[in-house]
Structures are given as C-alpha cells and as structure tokens.
Amino acid sequence: MSTSFPEAEYLILSSRLIPDHDGGYAMAVLSRARQMAAAGVHEGRGPLLLTFDPGTAADHARHRSAFVGRDLVVAEDRMRNLFDEAAGPHGGAADWLRRAGRPGEPDPALEYRRIDDAEGRAVVGIPVIHGDPDWHITTAPVAVYDADGRVAGIVDGFGALYRAWLEHVVDGLRAATPAEPRPVVVVCESRQLGELIAGWSDPGVRLIHSIHTIHLEPPFTPDAPVNALWERWFSVAERFDAVLWLSSAQRSDAVQRFGDEGVHLVIPAGVPAASAIVPGSERDRGRVVMLNRLAPGKRVDHAIRAFRAVVEAVPYAQLDIYGGGAEREALQALIDAEGLDAHVALRGITDDPERVLDAASVFVTASAFEGQALAIVEAMVRGCPVVAYDVPYGPRDHLAHGGGVLVPDGDEAALAAAIVRVLEDPEEHARLSREAAQMARRVDPDHVTAALAQAVADVIAAPSRRAQW
C-alpha cells in the first residue's frame, strides 16, 4: 500500500490544541499531522493545523512552542489560529473578517466576550451562550470592530465566522499557486466544527471527518439511544466526502443505524511500535499504571476501590495514576478514605508516557466507554498487558485477540482479580505481553497513513458530495 499523498493543500481542523489538555484526542490529532509530514505532505512540513479557540496570541504562541519542544509538531508556523488572524495590522478586524460582515449590532440581550489584539484593541465580540451544549450553532451576531474600537458590523454566528476564516485561508493557499490550483483536503477532527462546515460548497474542497469518541448513550449497545450531541451530526454525515471511524465495531454500529452511502471508513490512529519490548522480569514488579484524564467517564474511582483487594493479595502492589482533571480532589479524598495512600498515587500529567509504560507491569483502565482508547494502544505496542472493563469501543476491540484481560463492566472485584492474576503469574504476564506487542502491526503508522492516503486519493477523484445538496 503506497504512502504517497496526492498533490493537494492539506488542512487539519481542531477546535483547540492545548498542551496537557484533552488527553488522547490532542495526541491523536498531532500524531496524524506528524505522520502525514513523514509521508511527504507539503515537502515534509505536514498539513496546516488550524485551531479555533479564542485564547490570546501569547497563549497560542506558548502552545506552539511547547508542542515543538516536545517534538509533536514539525514547525510552529504550521499551526494557525482564527482569533490570532482576526486582528488587522492597524487595529480592528482584519480585512477578510470585515468583508464577511454585514451592517448590524450585537444582541443587547446577550453577554459578549471581547477578543482584543496584542495591543489591547477590540477585534471581535463573541456571544456567550450559557448552559447550552449547542452554543456553537447559534446565529447570534458576532461583533466585528473597526480600528477605532467601534462596531463595524456583524457576522451571523460562529458558523459564518469559522467559514469566513477557512475561505480566507484557502484563498491564500490558492493565490500562492494561481497557475496550478490544487484541490484542498480538509480533515476535520471536531464534531462541532464538522456540523458548521458540512455545507461548505466550494467544489475544490474535500471534507474528511474523523471520529474520536463514542456516539451512544448507556448501555452502549448498537440500539442504545444516540447521544443528543451526535443526533444533528448524523443528519449531515453524508455530506462529508469520507468519515473515518477508529474501529470496525463502531463503524458497523453506525452503518446499521444510519445506513452506508460509501463514506464510512475504518482508519485507526497510528502508534509506532517500541524499538524494544521491556521483558516482564525488568519491569517494576507490582507497578500498575493508569493514563487518562481524571474525569467521571474514566471511572478512576473503580480502580482505586479495586486496589484494596489487589494490595491484600499483592502487598507490594503500587497504582500510579497519571493525568489531570476535575476529579483530582475527589479521587485523593477516596485514596485517603480507603487507606491506600501508601499504594496509590496521583502522579499528575506525564510528558513521557513511554517511560511510564515500559516500567509498568500492568496497564489498567476502568472507562465506561471509549473511542479508540489511545492509551490502551500505546500500552500494548510497548508490550504492557492491559486489564480493562469489557466496554465499547476501544477496550473490547483491542483485546479481542489477546494482550490483556477483559472483565465484566463495573465489576470491581473482577477487575482486582484480573490485576492480581497478571501480576502474580509470570507465564500469564509473558503471554499477554507477547500478544500485546503483536497488535502493533495493526496500528503501524505506515499502514495507517497509507490507508489515509488512499482515502484522500479516492475522494479527490470523485466530485464533492456537497454538490448534490
């Protein structure tokens, strides 16, 4: 399978990319960009990474610098932000934003957040929609300021604002090669952004949408209710030129529910194999690790409670929990209440997950649901056995062929027993470690990137699907 991408302009869209936020999502997005760069996209500089979060230019500069320092992006100039570029050189909004506006005033009934340039001059005023998960689809006016700090006009909602910037970016790319216009391939990594650009009618643009999470509500069976945030997305899914699912199971469930118009593909996130697998005898005996956000859906509390039984059977066992999030204080209180402070530690965010996984004897996850569960993949490619609840989509898919132990969802006693078995049985540990490492071939970056390159070639060869809408 060839890893050569067709000649095109490549953009990756993410609502935000902030160091040490959004867990596996951010790492998956950045990994895709780096793997495309390694395959020669834009002479090895990779696609443009476009973000839409309304932070300051100084914030975004720090983010870019941090990613470059960690070798997560090829170059700082390959990351651009809407609000950084909304400011004109002489104050007020940039020309492209003023042209997109129309006469009007902000809604007096709404609260507005003013976005200033580096000199503190007003550029954009965005409406603040409190408590509404569908805030992004509002058509409430976005205020556009002139060089004197006065409202010069309005843009009709976030969708119009985002599309105006994207059109400006694409116009600039096309202007660089006017004699040889190239197709524009947009990989959208955000459901909210996807909804807002699904109707982008430019015939030279191909839209590919990547899925990062589950679309179902409990009990997460194929016929379970669809998460309300995804209902509207599915109504526009067939407008994308391709939709990339992380697992065959999730793609199958979506197709069974909503039909298949030929746009749904399975392309997982690529994870490089370890150059060498650390054998069980050289790992920290008894060390169990978790790598995830400290968020309710990750159910870290299940693992903490289960660890009481683990310590009773394996007194030298240690659970190191890596990650940050809103649950940290409550989880520390649980550790204290369970009397596990000598055996369970919240280690915060790590910038070296490979080292953590190479030292661990077991990786454990207690999530209620996953998309791909990137941390599970990273553990397996480094030969670290996994213990997980049997939930869709990541754990069930990844461990179907070995490399770990699946236990009934929510059964903390079974979770503890599985951890003990893997820690205490050297033969079991060695077998699972071998199986885990073999899984690396399925997520090899060259294989995954080649599949994406073929998907791009296919959508470029066909007319834009939005031509029919």
Image: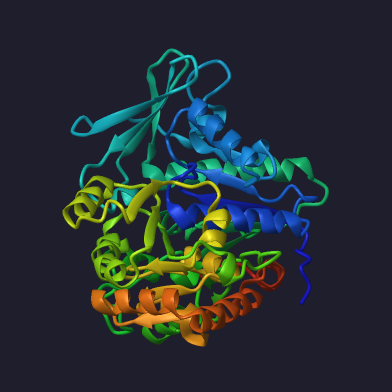
Is residue 284 shown left or right of residue 301? Answer: right
Measured as percent of width and height from the top left, residue 321 is found at 38, 55
Measured as percent of width and height from the top left, residue 405 is found at 42, 81
**Quadrant of the image for the N terminus?**
bottom right
* Residue nearest the viewer, comparing 159 with 60: 60
140 shown above or below 455? above
Residue furthest to the right = 179
Whether residue 261 is visible to the viewer of this picture, yes or no, is: no
Measured as percent of width and height from the top left, residue 235 is found at 37, 70
* Residue nearest the viewer, comparing 380 with 80: 380
Whether residue 264 is visible to the viewer of this picture, yes or no, is: yes
* Residue nearest the viewer, comparing 75 with 294: 294
Residue furthest to the front = 315
Is residue 178 shown left or right of residue 460? Answer: right
* Residue nearest the viewer, comparing 272 with 107: 272
Q: How is the image coloured?
A: rainbow
Q: Quadrant of residue 339?
A: bottom left
Residue at image position (26%, 58%) is: 296
Instruction: Give the total number of marks visible in the rendering.
Output: 0
Residue at image position (22%, 34%) is: 110
187 shown above or below 428? above
Measured as percent of width and height from the top left, residue 125 is found at 36, 29
Residue at image position (67%, 36%) is: 77
Q: Quadrant of residue 69?
A: top right
